[in-house]
Image (cartoon, helix red, strand yellow):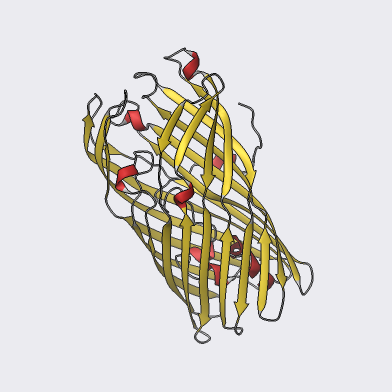
Amino acid sequence: MKKLLTYTALASVMAITNANAAGFHLREQSGAAMGNAFAGATAGAENNSYAYFNVAGLTRQKGTQLNVGGTYIAPEASASNIKNVGGQGDESDVHNIVHSAVAPNMSYSHQINDKYTFGLGVNVPFGMITKYDARWAGADHGATSKVTAVTTTPMIAYKATDKLSLGVGLPIQYFKARLTSTAMAGNADVAMEGDSVDVGYQLGAMYEFSDKTRIGMGYRSEINHKLKGEIESKLAPVSTYNQDITARIDTPAMLSVGAYHEINDKWAVMAEYQRVFWNSFDSIDIYGADTPFLSHTPENWEDANFYAIGTSYQIDDQWKLRLGLAYDDAAVKLDYRTPRIPDSRRIWYSTGLEYKYNENLTFDMGFTYIQAKEASIDIAPRGTSAGVKADYENSVKMWGLSVNYKF
């Protein structure tokens, strides 16, 4: 498969779990915002990492700044009460379905003048890994699933008035997927892999009622990917399972609205609402170079809502404490839930610390514990594929760290 683009600086750390947000969305793009469970992410604009959520907030970043960070994600996921329906397979409980990984992020901003600020962000907004033993009871419907999206976004923000700021960005997204199973070749291992580069857009607006109170809105467009790759099976050396393929996957649009208010010199409160338009992810259709239509997998995902509230306490001139609580919808309902993404609703509990070393250098640390509601899958046999039933328990711990430097 020909690579369309390579991100060499990030390639070694792109293993991401799906347990920390609805579907395979990764919200962890700011160490500071993480401490508030991303409440007020579109209105806070406390450093330039918040531009991922609202590019208009760049007008609050003075001079030239660089923010570099990452999140260590430690998930726990297991499947129990596994039943194979109409076939064979190991019905033992499955543990360690997902593995720990690091999700990096970087943002740069430069104030051109009193009106314009330029920004550049590198983020991993989507990703997941689920991995089962190749002979588990549900292997017909998924053994290994890995999805990675890396986005580079040039941005520009404009201060239209003393109170209103506007912004626009151009997300350039590299998307790669690898899926393995045993279904398509009659108990032969099958691997499909493909990637693509496509472009979307980002819009933002921020209105500042005063120095202490502001609201923000951010929108990131859907990006339509046409993946090119190959399907391969060493145990089934026939053209159907060894050929070039294409597949269409759309990453969803996202709309966020947030508010930030400083009660006094010590306390601030914030809130956030986000809607992720997962309804664009309705199916996975795979086409082969030699076989015009290879497979169709209905997904029928639904839009997911995210709600968050948070507070910050300025301990002294150097230290700030952050707290946050959030609720995250599931994008996948029972009728369409699969072993690849056993999605469910979840509650976020977050805290964080900011340490201002001096006027130029600031460190942000965040911790989040996510408790997911128990989820089940119930897939009926179809064609040559056996059915499977299972119950899932998921949770995740995340540690975020970022460094912000003003030149």
360 up-or-down from 182: above or below: below
**Would residue 72 be found to the left or right of residue 157 on screen?**
left
Considering every residue shown, the one lying at the far bottom of the view is 264
* Residue closer to the observer: 370 or 226: 226
Q: How many marks?
A: 0
* Residue 8 coordinates in the image, percent (x, y): 64, 39
Q: Residue at x 39, y 49 (%)?
A: 19
252 up-or-down from 86: above or below: below
**Would residue 325 be found to the left or right of residue 160 on screen?**
left
* Residue 380 coordinates in the image, percent (x, y): 26, 34
**Would residue 72 be found to the left or right of residue 141 on screen?**
right
Q: Residue at x 43, y 29 (%)?
A: 180
Q: Can the viewer see residue 26 in this picture? A: yes
* Residue closer to the observer: 35 or 315: 35
Q: Quadrant of the N terminus?
A: top right
Considering every residue shown, the one lying at the far front of the view is 292
**Would residue 389 be found to the left or right of residue 271 on screen?**
left
378 up-or-down from 213: above or below: above
* Residue closer to the observer: 92 or 253: 253
Q: Residue at x 57, y 56 (%)?
A: 69
Considering every residue shown, the one lying at the far top of the view is 237
* Residue 281 coordinates in the image, percent (x, y): 47, 45
Q: Residue at x 70, y 81 (%)?
A: 162
Q: Quadrant of the C terminus?
A: bottom right
Q: Can the viewer see residue 61 in this picture? A: no
* Residue 270 coordinates in the image, percent (x, y): 48, 75
Considering every residue shown, the one lying at the far right of the view is 113
